[in-house]
Amino acid sequence: MKIELTSKDGIGMLAAFAQKVGSTVENGRVEVPEKFGWGYIQGFNFDERLRMMIRNYELYQDFAISRRNQPANMLIFNFQHIINTSKTPAGKKLAPSVQITTQGLNAEIFIPKNTVLNSIALVIDAGYLRELIGARIDHPLVNTILENKQPLLFEEFVVAPLLKVVDNIVTANVPILLQDFYYKLKTQELICQLLIALVNRDGKKLYGLNIADIKMLYQVKERLLQNLEEAPCIAELSRFSGMSETKLKRLFNQVFGKSIFQYFQNFRMQEAARLLKEERLSVSEVGYQLGFSNLGHFAKVFEEVMGVKPKQYSKLTNN
């Protein structure tokens, strides 16, 4: 199933999606019929400079979206794996994250069948975002994003303040007359929280990306996270990617905001937190399961990433 978008707003996407799955658009929302999958897609078109789309569904067939004649000045913020749902495949490690993409990197999206889409996408005009921020922020990375002159992609883990705003968006019971006002404020709050994370990154020189590099970086990330018991081998990842070690480390750090080992360790601790909270495993069980032979070292790394010791975290989340 393929949708070709030619309109410059999110309304065209909703109507085209509804037609493909044999549904209708009601109050900006499309429910997926059971024979096609489950879930819904909901859009808010605040004006030509800012819109939001909530996607929480799964389709039983491949799905592609092709965008044509879209404005080059639009930035896309895609918050992934952030809506609580019982439909997430068991055993899948899906840490909440957000992708920021600039011009030229969103011409076509392919979604394999039986993929759970669980995201909130914000599309905002770069000039409008500059107006909202004003001249008070002078940060190389933020300015490069706002200039929107080269194809770039960045990804960040979603932390507690962002998750709180997302929960407000998904669970709020707002009268229809006030929905645009409420959700527009929430989109701006999401972007603000994201920029807070981005300004903490190093303002290094940025390198333009092509689709092939991006696909390979995500394959490297997937390979990196397949086994959380062993630290990554840069030489092996370099051979796998076909990139030199220098290029791989440079582009990985640029896209994900951390070195390969830092990213691995951060994700490892996110998984440790999940095991403590959702699986209710003991601290020692989690430490050993994630490959730590020294529980004191595990506790130290966990505290560096999560801000509290694992025993404290376990007590706070399981009470």
Image (spheres, rainbow, N blue to C red):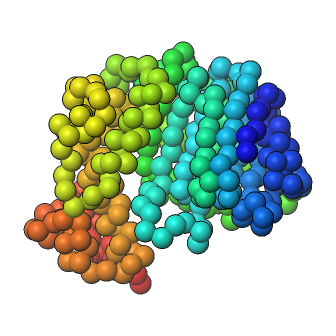
Q: Position of residue 29 (x, y in %)?
A: 82, 54
Q: Please tell me in which quadrant of the rendered image residue 206 appears.
A: top left
Residue at 23% x, 78% y: name it: 285
Q: Position of residue 291 (x, y in %)?
A: 18, 65
Left or right, 305 with reference to 215: left
Q: Nearer the viewer, residue 271 or 297?
A: 271
Q: Can see residue 303? A: no
Q: Position of residue 318 (x, y in %)?
A: 40, 81
Residue at 54% x, 31% y: name it: 101
Residue at 46% x, 23% y: name it: 210
Q: Nearer the viewer, residue 264 or 283?
A: 264
Q: Please tell me in which quadrant of the rendered image residue 10 appears.
A: top right
Look at the picture and state if 310 lies above or below 150: below
Q: Quadrant of the N terminus?
A: top right
Q: Quadrant of the C terminus?
A: bottom left
Q: Position of residue 199 (x, y in %)?
A: 41, 34
Left or right, 272 with reference to 167: left
